[in-house]
Amino acid sequence: MYSIDFNHPIHIYFIGIGGISMSGLAEVVLKEGFTVSGSDNRVSDLTKRLEDDGAEIYIGQKAENITDDIDLVVYTAAIHPDNPEWQAAVNAGIPMLSRAEFLGQLMDNYPESAAVAGTHGKTTTTSMIAHIMLAAECDPTVSVGGMLSAIGGNIRVGGSGNFLTEACEYTNSFLNFHAKYTVILNIEEDHMDFFRDIDDIRHSFALFAANTKDDGVLIINSAIDRPEEIIAAAHVSAVTFGLSGTEDYSLTELAYDRMGCASFICLDHGKKGEYISLQVPGSHNVVNALAAIACAKEAGFDSSAITHGLHSFGGTARRFEFKGRYHEADVIDDYAHHPTEIRATLTAAQNMAHERIICVFQPHTYSRTKAFWNEFADALSLADIVVLADVYAARETDTLGVDCADLARDIAGRGTESYYFPGFPEIEKFLSKKIMNGDLLITMGAGDVYLIGESLLGEN
């Protein structure tokens, strides 16, 4: 594998530079004096910001974009060997690294590195830890898979030895990371277009845990099935977090306010510690906060930074994000696209003041929708009214015969009012007539379903 000397800047070309992660990596090396160019399929705020910082951006991926002065090409998992820029780079003999390989090499330059993995909760927990680091004024470098207002986007380039990132299991990309502090939030079935089964997923997480640096710590949720197997694979010190009260990091005196946000006293190895007051709703965020606390304490951050950091965190874009009010109904947007995430979001919503919860859900990928069909129907049934959009295909084509109208009928069969519409305009027209004073409208999914809420709010 090609190895980068980060002390000697070169010209790096990013295929898919407009993605949330790729743009962040490009920004890091730009600020380190590297020459950066890259391509994407469309102009976005992220590509505009990179251009403002000095990157050369091409819209559309063409072989002629790969010029002789490029020293390294970095590509995302969505780029395949039939991509014209990939082929041009291979033909020109230019070294190539995947996004994950590049991020792993970047991480190795920081002695105090942390990587947050799990089927869900990665962005929120990474953001919570980032807030703690910022409260500690340790000047960290942060790469997060969402837009975090505290760092002005999805990346922060710091000047210290602290590095924090999400670690995604898809295509085993997280196996390129060797962090000092390895956090595992949960291990569930997902990305079944890549993994064979839950045992295959567990095997990958065990390998990820084993990548923890020798002087590091594995931080793991005790609620994971057979966590001792993952701990044994790591061969490093390990601590647990969770809600039972028996973990290394747990809590007592848990309470929720009228917005569903929790407060509690942290238990540090059985001893009462910090009083924590969260500004994000839901019991799932309590677990995320415990993971952040465990990571921060193991890394040596003090109590003040932990309490102030967590209290200052109000969420990231597209994670239970309040968008506005439409016809006296609150409009929320959430990235949830796995049944467990949907259940957590709708459960959190039930703790808020509302007349009815109307959930507009856009399934993400045909393979996930097919694999978790019944789980989706059960989780979505927690809403009072469900409106389904067509599947957001992302990297896939429909070879599985997935029909969201059928899913709507399955949800209705569980006793929940459910509808399907093929296009966003039809959904917006339906909602404009259906929404009443006091309703809670949640647009949900990893695609572009958020545009529905934004369109409605634009009519106010």
Image: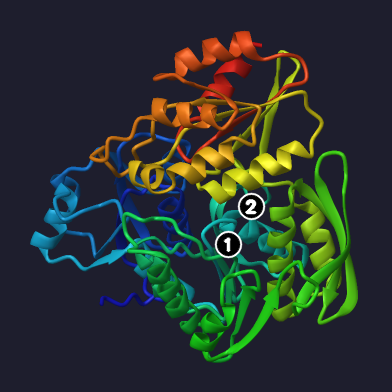
Q: Which residue is denoted by mark 1 in the rendering?
A: 142
Counting the numbered discs, the total is 2
Q: Which residue is denoted by mark 2 in the rendering?
A: 151
| Amino acid type shown at disc 2 | Ile
Mark 2 or 1 closer to N-term? 1
Secondary structure, mark 2, is helix
User: How many other residues sit within 10 Å of disc 2, few (<14), some (14-19) or many (≥20)?
Assistant: some
Q: How is the image coloured?
A: rainbow
User: Picture quarter containing residue 226?
Assistant: bottom right
Cβ atoms under marks 2 and 1 closer than 8 Å: yes
Tell me where residue 151 appears, x and y as whole percent. 64, 52
Secondary structure, mark 1, is strand
Left-right relation of 337 to 192: right
Alpha-carbon span between mark 2 and mark 1: 8 Å
User: How many other residues sit within 10 Å of disc 1, few (<14), some (14-19) or many (≥20)?
Assistant: many
Q: Nearer the viewer, residue 80 or 119?
A: 119
Q: Nearer the viewer, residue 180 or 141?
A: 180
Left-right relation of 224 to 128: left
- Quarter of the figure that contains the N terminus: bottom left
Q: Who's the residue at 68% across and 67% down the image?
A: 291
| Amino acid type shown at disc 1 | Val
Q: Nearer the viewer, residue 134 or 340?
A: 340
Residue 194 appears anywhere in the view: yes
Left-right relation of 406 to 316: left
Look at the picture and state if 52 lies above or below 243.
above
Tell me where residue 358 appears, x and y as whole percent. 63, 25
Tell me where residue 32 appears, x and y as whole percent. 46, 65
Q: Who's the residue at 46% across and 73% down the image?
A: 205
Look at the picture and state if 387 lies above or below 3.
above
Tell me where residue 189 appears, x and y as whole percent. 45, 59
- Quarter of the figure that contains the C terminus: top right
